[in-house]
Image (tube, grey):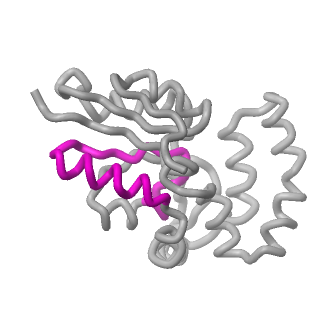
Amino acid sequence: MKKGIAFFDFDGTITTRDTLLEFIKYCKGNNAFYAGFLINSPFLLAYKLKIISNQAAKEKVLQHFFKNTPVDSFRVLCEKFAAEIIPGLIRPGATAEIKRLQEEGQTVVIVSASPENWISPWAQKIQVELIATQLEIKSGSITGKIAGKNCHGTEKVSRIKSRYSLGDYAEIAAYGDTKGDLPMLALAKHPVYKPFR
């Protein structure tokens, strides 16, 4: 039997803000950010009204801002964002809890609906594992579409179960802050909702 495993949502749980929004601002500037969301407001409204899916709305936004961005250029932006911006968004309580779990020998996994591209450098730095949304790449460029499914809601559970045999762990904990995290929290013996202030 392995020691415990802990699953953490990223945006809003570990961080104080949604990193997708912060990444767009970082790359494009505030004026382009607000103009882009105004242009895409019909799709965002349709998502709020449950006419289109979370994935469809997210793809509209990603396509508007990043379609045809060379993947090498995108990677550089993600690495700079991870180094310069993400550390300032991290909740101290989340850092303390992750360190505590690691010191106990538990496996710590970030499970995020945000693209893995800018979370991965930070996750590697603090030595935690990562499951996240993946972006489609064609002909060396970002298309703005998601490869497979958006890692949100029940998809978080599917991704977790495809990678980890949960029955092998003595303890399972999960940390989240929105209804999209509830399926993941339901896996845990120790679910924690909105844990860090």
61 above or below 80?
above
At x 36% / y 50%, what residue is drawn?
130
**What residue do we see at 50% from left, 48% from top?**
196
Q: Give the total of numbered labels.
A: 0
Image-quadrant location for residue 83: bottom left
Would residue 85 appear left or right of 106 to someone viewing this image?
right
- Spot occupied by residue 87 in the image (x, y as percentages of width and height): 47, 70
Q: Is residue 114 magenta?
A: yes
Relative to 35, residue 13 above or below: above
Residue 57: image location, x then y, percent: 74, 44
Residue 133 in view in this figure? no
Residue 50 makes an appearance in the image = yes
Q: Residue furthest left?
A: 1
Quarter assignment of residue 67: bottom right
- Locate residue 177 relative to residue 103 in the image: left or right: right
The stretch drawn in magenta includes residue 123 = no
> Picture coordinates of residue 78 (x, y %)?
51, 71
- Quarter location, residue 53: top right
What span is in magenta?
91-119
Residue in the picture at 67% in, 60% down: 21
Whether residue 58 sits left or right of residue 169 in the image: it is right
Q: Position of residue 175 (x, y in %)?
A: 44, 38
The structure residue drawn at horizontal position 44% and vertical position 60%, both measured from the top left corner, is 92
Question: 101 or 152: which is nearer to us?
Answer: 101
Name the one closer to the observer, 138 or 99.
99
Q: Which residue is more in the foreground, 185 or 168?
A: 185
| 14, 22: nearer the viewer | 14
